[in-house]
Amino acid sequence: ASGGPNAPAPAPSTAFSFGGGTAPTTSTFAPATASAAAPNAAAPGAANTSTTPAGGGSFAAAPSSSTPASSIPTIATIPAFDALFPRLRYQRLVSSALDRYRTRHGDGDGDAPEGESYAAREWIRLLSLRREDESPRGKSVGEALADPTSVLRFASPDVGFRNRLRPSSSGAGGPPPKVYVEVELPHDNDDDADDDDTPRRRQARAVTPHIAREVLRLSDELHLGETEALALYVAACALQAGGGSHGHDGEDGDVMATESEGDDGREDDDYDDDDDGFVQMLIEGGMVGFRTQSPPEPSTSQPPQFPSQPPAESPRPSRTLRTARRLFFRERSALLSAIHEVIRHRVEAADRAGRQNDGRHGGDREAMLVATDPLLKAGLVTNLIKTIRELTASMEGLARGLRAEEEERRRRRSAAAANANANANANANAAWNNANSNVAGGPSSSTGGFGGFGTSHPVGTDSTTTPSVEKNLDMEYALLSFAGMQRHIAAECLFYLAYHAQLTAEEVASTIDLIRDLTNGSDVAGGVGGGLPRLDPLVEDVPPVYGEVPMMTATTASVQGFMSQQHPQQPWQTWNVPVPKLKDPKEWEEEWIANLWGKGQPSLLQCVSTLIMTVMCALDARQVLMDRETHGPNSFGAGNALLPPHSDTSDPSMNGLQPIHTRLDPENKDTERQWKRCDIWGVLFLPYALLLRNSVVPLTSPRGSGSVPSPLSPDANPRTRGTMDAAKTFTDCLTAASQYKSLTFARLSLLPSLGLPSTRSHHKDVVSMGRGDDVSIFDFYISVLAECTAQFMDVLCASGNLPITQQMWFDEENNTAQVEWKRVEEKNYYDVLWGKTVVEDASGPREVDILDRPDCLEDVFALVSSVCSASPESSKAFWKIVEEELELTEDGSSPVTTFRLAPSRCMRLLETKRSDNDSTLLVFLSFLASLALSDGVEENDTDNGASMVHSFLSGEKSINAPSDRHAPFTWSNAISAIRWYAEELSPEVKDEGSKRDRLRRSPTTTTDTVPNPTSYYYGVGDDTESNDRDEASTPNDTHRSQSSSSSSSKGKTPSTKELDEVGKNALTSLLSLISNVAARCPAAREYILDIQLPVPGTDGVSDILQDGCLEILFSLLTTEIPPDIRGLTFMAIANLLQSKPGDTGKSPMGKKAWELMECCQFVPVKYLSRYSSFAAGAGSAPSMSMYNRNQPRDDGDVPNSYFPKTADYGMIYIFEHVEGVVGTYPATEGFLYLLTTLIKVAGCPSDLGSHWRLRPGCSPYIEYVTDFILPRASGTARHVKPLPFLTVADEGRLTSRALEVVEAVLVRYVVPLALDRATLSELRESNCLTMKAANEELGLSSNTSAIFCPNDSLDEDDADDFSQDFNNICLYPQNVDPGSQMLEVSYGEPVSLPKTPGFFILSSLLSTSKGQLLQIIQKLISENGGSRDIQSFYGKSVMSKLLAIALFRETPPSFSNSREYNELVGRQQRNQLDDASCKAAMTYLLHSMIQQPSPAVLDFCFEDAFSFETTNCAPDDAVLWRERSLLLSMRILCAAAAREEPFNRAIKHSPKQLSVVPTLLF
């Protein structure tokens, strides 16, 4: 399973296989050597018959095969396997019929043949329900599919039958008497015996003691009846012997044998444990949360050893027993898997029928609906709901039993530890008395003083005694995990049915009741399971931050007491008193997640979320739903039969909605009291309000005056008078959802529980919706949620029910508190006048508790942003699609109708409010950033969301009609706002005449002015007057200005400002908007980069200097901004620099960006230069924590970082000392993404930094990636602690970003043909020859475009640079002007010219000494199972944590917050903090934990190294990033292999022996 420990697994029929043996070929039963047939395999030919050797573990036939079964006394008759376990047969019949149906008709959209084919008629007959006049054996397939209940049935043991199965021995020392059972044999072809009443053959079989033990063990483990366990064991024996799935044996039916196995349970060593992979996965999934900690060990001289896990079963289960276990789980899952498969094919058929809006379009296409509609009429939906209830109750019972057993184990271990401590106490007392005697002058002990402590064994106890063997609970864990998987599959079946089929009001009401009962739990009447209560993020639902206090044994106490007596001048605390140890944050987090999974709450949240989506689909009034009576769409087309669209012939009565209305009426207080989670109840209001939308005309705001009665209100429609008021219910649903914070639940709990695209795309539950591609269930979920959210937004805007902003709510609450306080003061005043006693209250007005804040405007649009980030394709739902007719063509043909995106009602209203209310501006910007992710209607870039947003912000189009009341928001306003933040955040040195050095500004040629938009932005200090701009002449000056905290300027105090939450949201919204639009719209990139803002002077507007867009963004990077905003700024710059499609030349703006980055010194070349002695005019460098890496160091002395904690080290400082503390690296990832983009658009300029570096070029930046980032990210760096990662997704992102840089460099590198001075034509010819050889000789034709650059991208500079790689060129400092203060001049010796980055990387990969880069790539490819276990390891890890966080809604816990809470409680207990102060501090702590609504941020990835097509990647999608790192690693190896031969040939013909000297020293 990929979604978590208890997440749904693929159908067991494909998740595991059966091991065992083939039919024996001799008269003896040799150990199995080959895999047995699967349960649905046909029976092989007749096997030789024989009796079982003495002591064997097989089922033996009666002494004579000719003896009739009736002549042998038997204790029971065992029905055939398929009679007691029929689900596998149903699944086989369904699968084979579906295979024939698909073979006949395929899955395409082509026309179906006329009439019903035989396969279609067979399919209809197979699923038909039995008529009353028929009485065939057992259930029909249709009846079984319509009733999937009783997945797990727990039988009570039959003591009498067990005694008969295990008789006592027949005499003194003799063997027990033989016991026989009568086994019912299957028909020769039981799959076709559905209507066959022919009696089955029976045969008597002997049950050996070994078989009896295993059968009873199977019965106990799986909670089966003894007869069921015997039938299951018989089928497992048949599988071991090579028989069919029904336990069918040879023609004579003499015996069904298992492997030769004695009573001791020993078995052959050839068994493949991989066959038990599925069962083992179930066990591991069920164990999560129950076994998280090993028991504490007492601190005695000889502590007893307790196993951290229960011991293995003794004896080990036989192969037959393990096969029986697998067969059981497969059989139990077969029916729901078959139902799931049928429903998915039904969805496909319904999709085709809905698109044609005609259910009768070619007989066979209708057959799927005709065949499956009887299942709905037979109560399939109700039975699926019942199944979920049953499985939840089973899970609760299993979990309760497991917790009780684990508690009992802990009790026994504690008792054993106390017993050991008591024994040690006896020894301690003897030593204590001995010590006191010595002090008092009495006789000394033979051991001499304290020498006897811990030398003797505990009194009265054997030191070698071991605890008794504990009961093995593996199958209990497996059943628990299996029940969770089956529950989720049943919930998904409900979702798929509601997605396309018309449900009844009773079925929807039952689903709502199920959601209520699951969330309430069994503590409430009618509830089931453990429930989903609101969790406490500080105390009850998180583990303690401190470990258990080590047990203070009597020995320790005696020593401390004695030493305190002898040394009273020293306090007793100095004598090693055990103190609790602070847990490691990672350990605490793993324990926290495991505890939640142990309670089953994350898996329950998944199930509840699926059921919520089911209700959304069932109440949807915009889709074409299938009618189960007509086997096609509803007669009215799009709409919902629960409340049909109004027409002249429709019945407007809403009585049919009464079952739903009773449960979803916000005014019904009795119903409200039935819900423990009103936020979940409120989510269901959204689709209910949308269902009522078309019946409420007109829509009015509750704050407005005058309400026009609805046709369905009691006053307007007599037929509904006294039943319900649709208009009022509609309004109440909209407001109640906000009051209950249901939108916050949808954003932070519902959406994460739906999964991630990559973790759900490989699930078996996919359906081909007639488009030729597999659509995961995640795509279904997100499309439904996006459509519901978009309609809800439209309803809010149309009815005027948009909520107020957070600031407005806070002001209102604050004013209310002030009014209340004034009233209290007035009352007290008059009470004093009347002589009444007044209790003085100096507390003042009450504090506004933001935990009570309802969902505000920011929360509404934060949900939109989260939905669009989870699935950018869903952004189209928030646009309006309009139809246009193009003009007639010249040939006179009819006009062409096209569709395009247009502003929605919500966008227009928000744009108006943005103009009237500045507090909504950030919401507007984040909304535009989300809409920019949308694709166009016609699937072209000129009409996508980014192009439309650009047209609005560039002035080409307008969202609303032009108005004189307000000016539209433009790109210039956005860039101006960013400049304002950069200036406000810039550290200014407070001394006269000294200002912060600025990046160089360009001279202007125009005097146009731009309106100052700073009034829209707030959150950073006070507005200050603009200062004069000074130019920085060297990178050293600019770099020095970045580190305000470490400024070495004497007498100068830097003044810095920090962003508050509003400022962070403002910059995030602006940068996300620029990044999203620029990545998808070439015209926007060109427009934004051309923006030049005039620099305000002291007397107006300057006409000399201008700020360019790039300069402004880079100046923001030189300020102290959070890592996430820094990374977003890097990403915005990178997306702005992307080239146009088809443009392969080097970009001048890219070269300019290289120079700006060199000027900013993000990579501290000055401090890390291999030859620098820091005497080039820059002063002395900070002391580095570097050491000789050749000297090994102890583990305890290994540092966390390589470099000192000073901002002079730029991105290295941020990487190690800022991001490394948290474990996530957004700034470094953004910087790496910018490096990749610069290499793609501008190459690696060889003259970069030539004005101040003797060794110019881009080598320092590439070495920063290959020699610093990649070793740290991959864990191969020596003599430093491993780099911490918050999640595996963070590790995958950082690794992928670094590999992207390596790939981009390598792809651009071409080995020249001529080594002296290659011309451009020769370089391009070499590129073509290398590419041709890769295609023809290495078989890399499918990857050629990804590992080679096009010839058009090469220029003369590349030809010169690549040729110089094969000549050792030295630079002589003597030839440089000493006054130039160039770096490395003071070294005094010749300095080698750096090789190009491509040569450096290629030589590292192809080095015979196995360079570091090659070792890193090898490790990345092979770690954690390589490409085999991505879903199970990475998907499980990330989903487990996401679901755990989702349970806490907006206040997720953290180790630091829990630690701070413990410290507050400790201070209060020590009377260091009074109650009022402690309460205020805890309230502040809770407020700080609230996840404020903020714009969601997406990462961008290039399709390949030389493509500018980007895709959006979810930051938390660990599976995607792991797959990407593997893909990049393989591409890098392919690119290196393609260049290996020409590279080696060039080195061989080089006139000199080449050497690679790095630029930097890490």
Image (cartoon, rainbow, N blue to C red):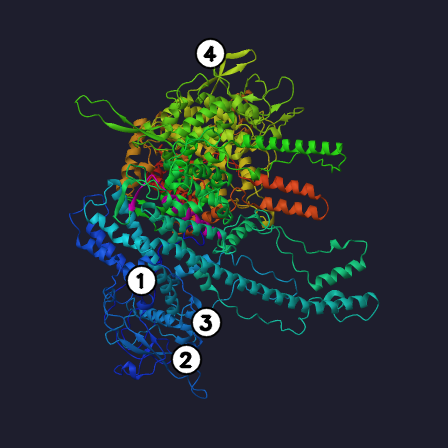
Dot 1: within a 10 Å radius of its alpha carbon, few (fewer than 14), some, or many (20 or more) residues? many
x then y, percent, for residue 100: 21, 55
For mark 1, give the secondary structure.
helix
For mark 2, give the secondary structure.
helix
Q: Earlier in the sequence, mark 1 or mark 4?
A: 1
Find the distance from the CA under tag 1 to the CA under tag 4.
81 Å
Q: Is 514 left or right of 425, judged from the image as shown?
A: left
Image mark for residue 88? 1
Q: Earlier in the sequence, mark 4 or mark 2?
A: 2
Residue identified by numbered label 4: 1007
* Three-letter amino acid code at the position of disc 2: Arg
In the image shown, does 1007 or 890 lie closer to the viewer? 890
Residue identified by numbered label 3: 315
x then y, percent, for residue 554: 70, 64
Residue identified by numbered label 2: 164
Mark closer to the observer (1, 4)? 1
* Three-letter amino acid code at the position of disc 1: Leu
Q: Which residues are the magenta region?
A: 601-626
Mark closer to the observer (3, 1)? 1
Q: Earlier in the sequence, mark 2 or mark 3?
A: 2
Q: Earlier in the sequence, mark 3 or mark 4?
A: 3
